[in-house]
Image: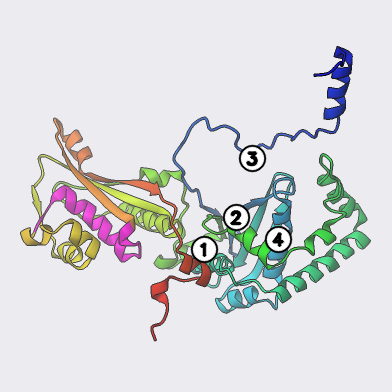
């Protein structure tokens, strides 16, 4: 509206948009969902040949361009863990770990946070459990203390000044590395920015990048240490192939008998243990040429003594037997439950197949597994106090 000419309108448009800042493409930000695929956690790798063992857990963390405030908190956390007089180092040393180290690598769009330690006497799983406990501890709402954060900030300032004074080439390399649109001051303003971090910043950072997240586990060990490992400390390479786990059986048999099947069961137990948000469905199958009934008093007692299974199968203990395909599934369920997997995470199905050949009949005698990722919900009580309400001592 008005008496502007076409040329004046164009000039005004140019003037309006001259300070417009376009947002550059971030490859880690999803703009459109093309397809949904099942989530599979790939969490354990193994490297042999080293003289000393080292257990590490790696978490994906923010980058300077993605979540700058969180990157400052990441540097604080690494300093808190590396403090030899700090609470975290002391607790890990008491658990038998040594050479404890945390390192945060900050890139523009993403970062990596690695927590590592040397296990004691080939106790690999104990080492990983203790490193996991560190993440559980720092996820509690009231874990961080202002005094510890201030100490970490001072230590970082000393390291920063030493780098700037004694390694100017390295310092300038960092300045160049983090140079991006409209801001070349990530490193030069680093100290001023990191001093803003407080307890609330740390708690928000932990909630966004550690709580209910799974780190990638990595074990570096010698070949001899892997041979001497205790059964309860055995470490398996785990990847998406866990979804293809299958147990096969001889005619009319319901027990897992081979060493390969026993190891497959242990792999499944370890997978479920380190992935608490994954449930398993056990699918038992049989062939029509097998027995219809299967007997095992220990399984019937297990069903009768476990509230969830007893409620779902009230007639099982009355009859005194189970169908053979159901018995196969229940024996695996029993093994998982006795290994510490919660009954609410275990379910199952059973089915009888027909066959025309001996090969087809043998293929029908099996149990397969279906994994489902379900994010656990934390109650408000557990969020505020760090444990479930029924775990509190009664007065």
Q: Secondary structure at mark 2?
A: helix
Query: Does the stretch in magenta take in 333?
Result: yes
Q: Return the x and y of residue 247 as percentages of the image width and height.
A: 28, 48
Q: Residue 5 falls in which quadrant of the image? A: top right
Q: Does residue 116 appear left or right of residue 344 in this picture?
A: right
Question: What is the C-alpha distance between the residues marked 4 and 1?
Answer: 40 Å
Residue at x-position 22% and y-position 55%: 330
Q: Can you tell which of label 4 and label 1 is closer to the viewer? A: 4
Q: Which residue is mark 4?
A: 73
Q: Is residue 9 magenta?
A: no
Residue at position x 64%, y 74% in the image: 89
User: Mark 3 or mark 2, which has the lower sequence index?
Assistant: 3
Q: Say left or right for 37 vs 19.
A: left
Disc 2 crowd, CA 10 A, few/some/many (<14, 14-19, 20+): some
Tag 2 residue? 208
Q: Which residues are magenta?
A: 321-344
Residue 136 at what x, y percent from top left? 53, 66
Is 370 situated left or right of 53 in this image? left
Tag of residue 224: 1
Crowd class of label 4 (few under 14; some 14 to 19; many from 20; radius 10 Å): many
The circle on residue 37 is none
Earlier sequence position, callout 4 versus callout 2: 4
Answer whether residue 262 is visible to the viewer in this image.
no
Q: Circles 3 and 1: CB distance less than 8 Å?
A: no
Badge 1, how many Cα within 10 Å: few under 14, some, many 20+?
Answer: few
Where, quadrant-wise, is the C terminus in this rendering? bottom left
Check disc 3 and report its element: helix, strand or loop.
loop
Q: Is residue 326 left or right of residue 386?
A: left
Q: Is residue 184 depicted above or below 77 in this figure?
A: above
The residue that label 3 is drawn on is 28
Question: Circle 4 — which element?
Answer: helix
Label 2 near label 4: C-beta < 8 Å?
no
């Amino acid at each position: 509206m008005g008496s502007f000419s076409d040329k004046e309108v164009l000039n005004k448009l140019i003037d309006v948009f001259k300070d417009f800042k376009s947002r550059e493409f971030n490859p880690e930000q999803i703009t459109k969902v093309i397809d949904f695929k099942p989530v599979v956690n790939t969490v354990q790798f193994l490297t042999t040949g080293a003289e000393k063992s080292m257990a590490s857990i790696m978490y994906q963390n923010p980058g300077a361009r993605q979540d700058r405030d969180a990157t400052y908190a990441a540097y604080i956390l690494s300093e808190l863990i590396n403090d030899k007089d700090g609470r975290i180092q002391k607790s890990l040393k008491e658990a038998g770990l040594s050479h404890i180290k945390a390192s945060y690598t900050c890139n523009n769009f993403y970062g990596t946070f690695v927590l590592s330690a040397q296990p004691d006497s080939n106790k690999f799983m104990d080492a990983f459990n203790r490193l996991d406990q560190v993440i559980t501890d720092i996820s509690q709402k009231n874990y961080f203390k202002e005094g510890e954060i201030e100490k970490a900030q001072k230590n970082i300032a000393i390291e920063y000044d030493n780098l700037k004074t004694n390694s100017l080439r390295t310092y300038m390399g960092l300045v160049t590395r983090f140079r991006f649109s409209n801001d070349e001051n990530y490193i030069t303003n680093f100290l001023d920015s990191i001093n803003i971090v407080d307890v609330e910043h740390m708690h928000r950072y932990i909630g966004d990048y550690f709580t209910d997240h799974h780190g990638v586990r990595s074990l570096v060990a010698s070949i001899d240490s892997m041979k001497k490992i205790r059964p309860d400390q055995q470490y398996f390479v785990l990847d998406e192939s866990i979804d293809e786990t299958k147990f096969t059986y001889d005619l009319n048999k319901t027990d897992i008998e081979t060493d390969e099947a026993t190891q497959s069961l242990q792999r499944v137990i370890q997978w479920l243990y380190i992935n608490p948000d994954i449930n398993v469905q056990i699918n038992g199958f049989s062939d029509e040429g097998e027995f219809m009934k299967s007997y095992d008093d220990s399984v019937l007692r297990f069903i009768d003594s476990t509230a969830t299974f007893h409620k779902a199968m009230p007639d099982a203990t009355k009859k005194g037997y189970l169908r053979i395909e159901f018995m196969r599934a229940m024996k695996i369920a029993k093994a998982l439950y006795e290994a510490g997997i919660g009954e609410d995470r275990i379910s199952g199905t059973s089915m009888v197949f027909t066959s025309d050949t001996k090969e087809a009949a043998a293929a029908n005698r099996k149990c397969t597994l279906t994994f489902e990722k379900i994010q656990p919900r934390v109650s408000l009580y557990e969020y505020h106090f760090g444990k479930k309400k029924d775990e509190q001592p009664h007065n």
